[in-house]
Amino acid sequence: MDPATLRILVTGGTFDKDYHEIEGRLFFRETHVQEMLRLGRSRLAIAVETLMLIDSLEMTDADRARILEACRRAPEARIVITHGTDTMEDTARILGAANLAKTIVLTGAMVPYTFGSSDGLFNLGSALAFAQTLPTGTYVAMNGRVFRGDEVRKNKSLGVFEERA
Amino acid sequence: MDPATLRILVTGGTFDKDYHEIEGRLFFRETHVQEMLRLGRSRLAIAVETLMLIDSLEMTDADRARILEACRRAPEARIVITHGTDTMEDTARILGAANLAKTIVLTGAMVPYTFGSSDGLFNLGSALAFAQTLPTGTYVAMNGRVFRGDEVRKNKSLGVFEERA
Amino acid sequence: MDPATLRILVTGGTFDKDYHEIEGRLFFRETHVQEMLRLGRSRLAIAVETLMLIDSLEMTDADRARILEACRRAPEARIVITHGTDTMEDTARILGAANLAKTIVLTGAMVPYTFGSSDGLFNLGSALAFAQTLPTGTYVAMNGRVFRGDEVRKNKSLGVFEERA
Amino acid sequence: MDPATLRILVTGGTFDKDYHEIEGRLFFRETHVQEMLRLGRSRLAIAVETLMLIDSLEMTDADRARILEACRRAPEARIVITHGTDTMEDTARILGAANLAKTIVLTGAMVPYTFGSSDGLFNLGSALAFAQTLPTGTYVAMNGRVFRGDEVRKNKSLGVFEERA
């Protein structure tokens, strides 16, 4: 079990939202992924690549095509994607349909990392572990659990992920 | 992939240390594991059992026998043990030698959870994921990585875990 | 110097905003003032009264009349008002014009208390100190400084308070 | 009310303690005062001078003489001293006896700033406000309150400051 070689593809989402203190609203400044890896004292060999910093409700088909292309050309066989929770299942389905010979794990956060009460660090830790151990396929890691990308949905009234009925 | 059924055995360690504001020193009040699971919005079916709250430098053979016994009688096949980092490898070796038909993952923290800069939440997320996915055996999850229990050591000058040479 | 007898009037503002994790937006749940006083280990005899929980951009003349009335009927001679920063100067001017025989200090935060990077606790500490020591009048406490209520403005491009030119 | 010109003299204390993750104990790395002033969005003109970084139980007469000398030669008339809480009253008495024509406010924290539950930021905010508004003299600012330096004691069983009986 040598250090895994992983890639983290950053797409934005609640995970990376900051508070804009002049304008009094949430916005994207830059990703917090590197800072979170330092906090986790990560010794994994990880390449971090920021593809976009957007709310997943605004993610277009073209954005999803870019994410798929980034997965395809990544030299690493194990990939974590940080993503807004609202359309994570849509991106997971598109990536899954491509049947790449890679282990791809999408994760995100219900609360921005910059808030004290964020689930982001817990989710990042679990997503990196699932990415190291699961076989080829596309998955969603949220709430400590892992779901197959084509069997998951966000329960928007409860704010949790669950199996698609 | 239904919610896994896991047990967390709490033994203390840096992970759970608090600051005693009257006496000005670190001490154990109670475990933070439940609070951390709430923060991580965990939806796993987890039983939390506090075996002891001690610094792992003070852990005796009798303590390790109790931990092994708790693993043996746990109804769950997947167990996470929170443990001080200084002797985590010793406990891992004893548990591994018992060859239980269970997946056991030890984890801990370099910095107490109650400090802003703790790696605890990241480690707990990764340990729970490793416990759900790895085959039967005893492991240590630290620094985002996972090690076999009989092949790991803490590099005390760097404060990181690595393969035993 | 016995424990001062103070009243904190809560009106909302950035100070008290929370993140709504289901809806992904900032909102008011309840005030954090009591929690902040506990964190500050306050031993002041303080009455906390929540008048409203609103963004100060939405504060009406009727709201300001309610705040003035609450100052007037407060049994305490020393009052701190938590308030959104955008129209703090307007409320300060109205309260100042009423010439109550009280020391009234408005304060707020540039970043919600629930964010790690909030100035709220610092501002609350300073506002309570100014309220205990300044003579009768209406003041704004922000950025570690104190301003007379009729001589202050928020510099909205810098996000700081300064003397009105 | 122009920006006050203040000096902060740093002496250490719980306020500035960090967690040494290799050695698993509390220690002094450097002061957090500048970081706290940034967090508070302070716009005060403050000179920060680190005199020592020690636990106040280890403070000697020579250390106190250095603090007094630093107060004496400071060009500013308003001084805040960060100090361990255990002997804050002793230093306050020595500084008070010197009868400098300055306003000197000692403050500290019951819990290190690097812990989530610290009172440090609240205390620093209040100490800076008291230093700007109180007349010449030596004071202790803790628990939101201010005490004359010769009338205060730490109640070590409760962990709060109170008037000397």
Image: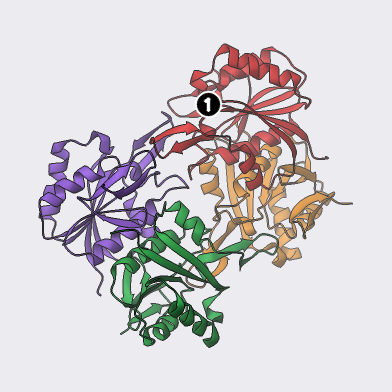
Chain colours: A red, B orange, C purple, D green
Instruction: Tell me the subunit letter for badge 1.
Output: A
Horizontal and vertical percent position of residue A46: 73, 36
Q: Is residue C13 above or below residue B154?
A: above
Residue holding disc 1: A85
Residue situated furthest right in the rendering: B165
Whether residue B20 is visible here, answered yes or no, is no
Mark 1 neighbour class, 10 Å CA radius: few under 14, some 14 to 19, many 20 or more: many
What's the amino acid at mark 1? Thr
Q: Is residue C160 above or below residue D159?
A: above
Horizontal and vertical percent position of residue D137: 32, 79
Number of marks in the rendered image: 1
Q: Nearer the viewer, residue A53 or D77?
A: D77
Q: Quadrant of the C terminus of chain D?
A: bottom left
Q: Secondary structure at mark 1?
A: loop
Residue drawn at x 57%, y 66% is: B26
Q: Is residue D109 above or below residue C104?
A: below
Horizontal and vertical percent position of residue C162: 31, 49
Q: Nearer the viewer, residue B112 or C61?
A: C61
**The quadrant where residue D26 appears:** bottom right
Residue drawn at x 62%, y 55% is: B15
Q: Nearer the viewer, residue A117 or A60?
A: A60
